[in-house]
Image (cartoon, helix red, strand yellow):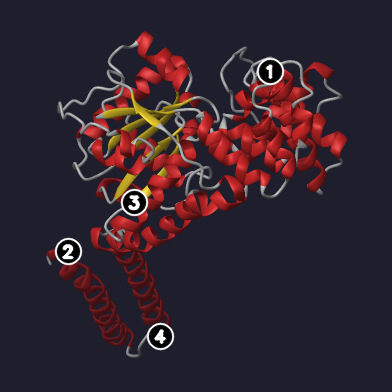
Amino acid sequence: MVGKNTRRVIPLVSATLTILGSVIAFKLTQSLSGSPNLPIVGAWMAVGIIVTYMLSRVQARSQEESPEAIKERVSQLEPELRKQVQARSYGARRQLIEAPLRELDRDITPRLGWVRDPRLIEPEPLSEKVADDIVVAFESSKRRMLLVGEPGSGKTIAAYSLIEYLDNTEGEERIPLLVNLSAWEAQNTFETFLVDYVCSSVGYEVHERAVASAFIGSGRYSLILDGLDEIPLRLRQLFSEGLDAFVRGLPAEVGVVVTCRTQEYEEMLAAHSTGLGLVQAVEILPLTRAQLDSALAELAKLDEDWEALLSQRHLEASQRARHVLSNPLFLNLAVAGRLHPGELLECEEEQKVRDLVLDSYLDRTITEQRQYAPVDARRYLSWIARFLNGDEVSPFSLKTSDYTVFDLADLTPPDPPRRYGLLGGWLWGWASDWAWV
């Protein structure tokens, strides 16, 4: 109340002084010269007007930075954040996953000893009846869960399902905030990273840092942290310590989910056996034989040639193809690339099956895009893949095997060696269907 009264008094006093000063100047010049000196009076009034204007600007800025004003802008920000999260997560699933594969059943299993909860909360056991329900696993984990799986197993898609669940159940109480951990830059605190992310162009582009900081400090969100494996191994323990310190200060009802590839998390555990400070770790498993059969049967309704992978499952070639397609990412790429199922049975090695799926998807995607000629698109993607795989010195003159960030504008390469062509396919499939990873 004192602050409000002070802001009201300042312009009132300034206006009063301007009027009194003008009157005094008028009387003084009149008494000294016998006639009023209008220029002096006008100058005094001009100074008063300028001072009044500057004080009003200070008052307006003070009001903008007041806790009440920032709280109001946070409340205006939250609906916009919610719309962005929806568009980036479960709202995009229809474009990411081919129609016959949108309802794939998945199995998950607990990974004991992979996380340790600082509050020593024991998770509720997962029953076999709900082993394919990521939401039940999340709730049994007291809303603090690590989600691991092999590349392409569907970790991010599962995280999108959780975002949809939280968005529908928590309503206006909290926002499920999706954060890509590839943007983490070893900030001093995890809260600083979240504020940086919300403000950044790779995050949500909130232009007022004070508003972003107030939102993060409010705790009106659940965190979906996607891609721990995208942080270099040498920095994962630093990330873990920062996250643990932050999570300890959160209310129990605030959910925290971290996704990571299985191998990368095992590497972190080997170096630092304590693991993340969450309640439970669960792993998404590859498709079982029955689940793959169900998916192939749905595909056969649209293209009867898929029936060959069902009726000839005893053949060695069919087994190779089925093993590759048990990975949801490759199954989706095969369908999206309009791959003829019979071609899969002609491959003599499993790696050739993978190459065929990727090449088919890449060819179809490049053909459908209009910005570049197909040969140029392949060439540029190959060189980008070469950089991302750590085969060259980074733009920062560092030789590294990490996924170094670089400026695409600096890439003006000639034709790359042919041996990097397949890497372009890997990158294109990763960029277009990253949500499966």
Whole-angstrom CA distance, mark 4 to mark 2, is 38 Å
Q: Earlier in the sequence, mark 1 or mark 3?
A: 3
| Secondary-structure class at tag 1 | helix
Residue 336 percent across, percent down from the top left? 69, 43
| Secondary-structure class at tag 4 | helix
Residue 180 percent across, percent down from the top left? 47, 37
Give the vertical position of 418 relative to 218 (above or below): above
Q: Nearer the viewer, residue 102 or 436?
A: 102
Residue depicted at 27% across the width and 34% down the height: 127
Give the vertical position of 217 relative to 429 (above or below): below
| Secondary-structure class at tag 2 | helix
Q: Residue furthest bottom?
A: 35
| Secondary-structure class at tag 3 | helix
Quarter location, residue 419: top right
Q: Residue furthest left?
A: 2
Whole-angstrom CA distance, mark 2 to mark 1, is 80 Å
Q: Earlier in the sequence, mark 4 or mark 1?
A: 4
Q: Earlier in the sequence, mark 2 or mark 1?
A: 2
Residue for badge 2: 3
Whole-angstrom CA distance, mark 1 to mark 3, is 44 Å
Residue for badge 3: 166
Residue 284 percent across, percent down from the top left? 43, 30
Residue for badge 4: 38
| Left or right of 52 on screen, residue 140 | left
- Viewer-nearest of discs 4 and 2: 2
